Image: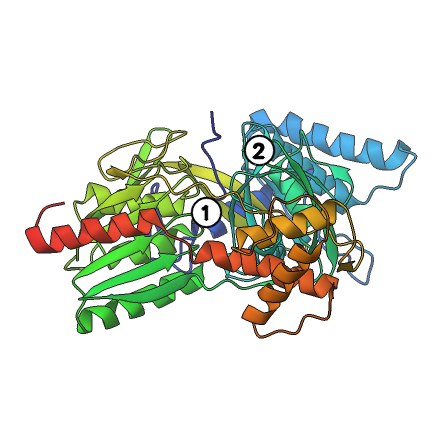
Amino acid sequence: MKNSCSLEVAEQYRSRRYFGFRITKKTTLNRLLATILAAIFIMSGTGAIIAEAAEVPSQAVQTETLTVPADERLLIELLRDVKEFVQNYHTKEVSQEELYQGAIKGMLDVIGDPYSGYLTQEEFDSLSFSLEGEFTGVGITIELIDGNITVVSTFRDSPAERAGILPGDHIIGADGQDLRGKTHLDAANLLRGPQDTEVLVQIKRPSTGEVLNLKLVRARIKPPTIDLKDLGHGIYYIEISQFTTATGREFPVIIDYLKSKDLRGLVLDLRNNPGGLLWDAVDVAEKLIPKGPVVELRRKELKEVIETDEDTVPVPTVVLVNGGTASAAEILAGAIKDRGVGILVGEPTFGKACVQTVTPLGNDMGGIRLTIADYYTPSGQSISGKGLEPDVHVRPELIVLPGKVDYKRPLKKGLVGLDVFSLQECLAFLGHDVGEPDGIFGPRTDAAVAAFFKDRGLIYSGSLTERETDVLHLATIEFVKNMHDPVLEKGIQVLRNKLNTGNW
């Protein structure tokens, strides 16, 4: 079974009611949680009813009286005693801040939820950048699925995509550290780092059983979340790769502009969209579905229906989905389907059905992420672990992308080896005649290399450097992007039929 939770951040930056709280820009759920945690943080560090403050010049200690429930007093005193015992007697110097962090981490670990946890300041900052649509790393979204750190999607033109990493690949190692049995957060900590630094990633591809060792150079990832194409006759294609703050700002502007022109129907591509910010997905939904429910959030006995109050006149929409469509993307797809605005075309979605919030702790103490609700589609459907079923099932063509040439030496005529074999596979994939790949750099292979570079207006010197093998690999990636897309073609066909006949 897939884990049913994901890092789905519910930013409460609207004037809404949420589980009994009136949420506004000034009083967010994040702020409420932060206040509660701050109180726990203060009490746990100093005893049952006394909270330390910053030292004043007179060396006096400023105190504050706090009211503590009787059933918690002994536990808080015990936490204080353990802290002091460790600081006084352990052979290692441990700071008060480290012990506080450990206490907070322990509170979240005991929940047993792999998607709730403590974030160091570095991890919190990195996550904040990614939610704003920018981060430094290799450009992949990962989740823990059946105990494997699994690639859900890769960002366009990222180091991961250029290296040929595919959705479904398992990350089993990074920078020499074995990640089997670890969490996706352990992997994220290793994969992210300063721009232009290298990271060696070990990938296992379940579809073939092969293990790949890939050297990636970290980059600043700022993926455009929306791609727009005019398909003609009032039909437009919009791809949303992730829901960031930019998505919520840009989509309403784009859709209003299209409606002012000739918009009759929309193909919305949510394939390999890992989710993102809940409220930005709701902002998109407001422009696609009529007034009413978007998603239902449930926590224990409490329920909250998030609705759109905008009087939107919907247009017929075909949503393209697959196994990489997750979280907020599933919320949007489910709302469009349940509200009768459109249908889903493709493959079953991922099946992430819980919402998380991320809140800072302040004082460079990092933050926490906490699962706060499960979500259901407007019709009350739970998709946990099973995903959304498409109305029209279409499987994409299975494409086996040749591996990148493992460059170790200049490649030229007369050489023999596995690197030559990889070179031949890439050339054959691109349609150049190398005969049967055999790992021998003969005249036929030489002619194929020369033809490849001539087609691209480049000069072939008779030898391939690492830069030139990179050009070859990027050409294979681009070739795949431009190949026949049966899911998209079916989506366009279904939409045209709706517009011409009125029926899906």
Residue 397 shows up from this direction: yes
Quarter-wise, where is residue 107 in the image?
top right
Q: Residues within 10 Å of mark 2 (few under 14, many from 20)?
A: few
- Tell me, for residue 478, which label it has, or none: none
Identity of the amino acid at label 2? Answer: Thr
Between 184 and 154, the residue placed more toward the observer is 154
Residue 404 shows up from this direction: no
Report which residue position mark 1 lands on: 274
Q: Quadrant of the C terminus?
A: top left
For image coordinates 71% across by 31% down, the residue present is 79
| Image label count | 2
* Above or below, comparing residue 401 to residue 449 in the picture: above
Q: CA separation, marks 2 and 1?
A: 24 Å
Between 124 and 171, the residue placed more toward the observer is 171
Label 2: element kind: loop
Q: Position of residue 18 (x, y in %)?
A: 34, 45
- Tell me, for residue 208, which label it has, or none: 2
Which mark is nearer the camera, 2 or 1? 2
For image coordinates 54% across by 64% down, the residue present is 222
Q: Position of residue 30 (x, y in %)?
A: 48, 50
For image coordinates 73% across by 61% down, the residue present is 466
